[in-house]
Amino acid sequence: MPIEHPAPRIFTLDEALSVFPRVTALTDHAVSAAAVVEAQLVAVKESAERRKELEAEYADVVRGWAQDVMRLGCEVKGLWLVDFDNGEGYYCWRYPEERLEYFHDYASGFTGRTKIA
C-alpha cells in the first residue's frame, strides 16, 4: 500500500504543541507494537519464513505510524523522528523526548537542533 502524503502544513508553535500529544500517543503505541515484534524476531532462530513474516510485520508497524503522523501534517524524518514545519525550519521531536522543545533550520537538520527559546 503506498504511503499517503498530505499537503505540507506550516505550524505555529502553539499549533505544533496542540498536535504534539497525538504524535506522542501514536508513537508510544507504535514503539510498543514494534517492541513486541522485535522480541519475537530475537526468539526466532531457525525459521527464515517466520523471520520474513515478522520483518514485514515490523515494517507495517513503522509504515502505519508514519502515515498516521503525516496525516497530522507533520514530516517523518526517521524512525520515531518527527518534524513540524514552521516556515523557517522545523520544530523537531524524537522519541522518547517528553516535550517538543527543539528547533532546527532547513539546512542544518537534526544535528543543528537548538532549544526553543
Image: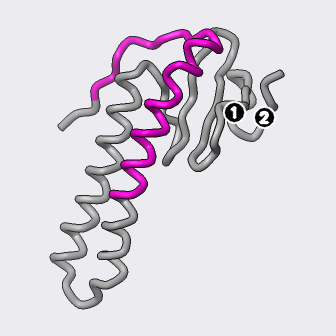
Q: How many marks?
A: 2
**Left or right position of 21 against 36:** right
Q: What amino acid is found at the position of numbered circle 1 in the picture?
A: Gly
As displayed, is residue 24 above or below residue 47?
Answer: above
**Left or right position of 75 against 116:** left
Extent of the magenta region: 4-33
Q: What residue appears at the point 72 percent right and 31 percent down from the top-left corner?
A: 101
For the C terminus, which image quadrant? top right
Q: What residue appears at the point 33 percent right and 67 percent down from the top-left corner?
A: 36
Could you tell me residue 77's position as x and y percent?
A: 53, 37
Q: Secondary structure at mark 2?
A: helix
Q: Secondary structure at mark 1?
A: loop
Q: What residue appears at the point 78 percent right and 25 percent down from the top-left corner?
A: 116
What residue is pinned by disc 2? 112
Give the label on residue 66, or none: none
Could you tell me residue 102's position as x and y percent?
A: 73, 31
Q: What amino acid is found at the position of numbered circle 2 in the picture?
A: Gly
Asked whether residue 1 is drawn in magenta, I would say no
Q: Are marks 1 and 2 in contact (CB under 8 Å)?
A: yes
As displayed, is residue 30 above or below residue 44?
Answer: above
Q: What residue appears at the point 17 percent right and 38 percent down from the top-left corner?
A: 1
What residue is pinned by disc 1? 109
How far, Cα to Cα, is label 1 from label 2? Answer: 6 Å
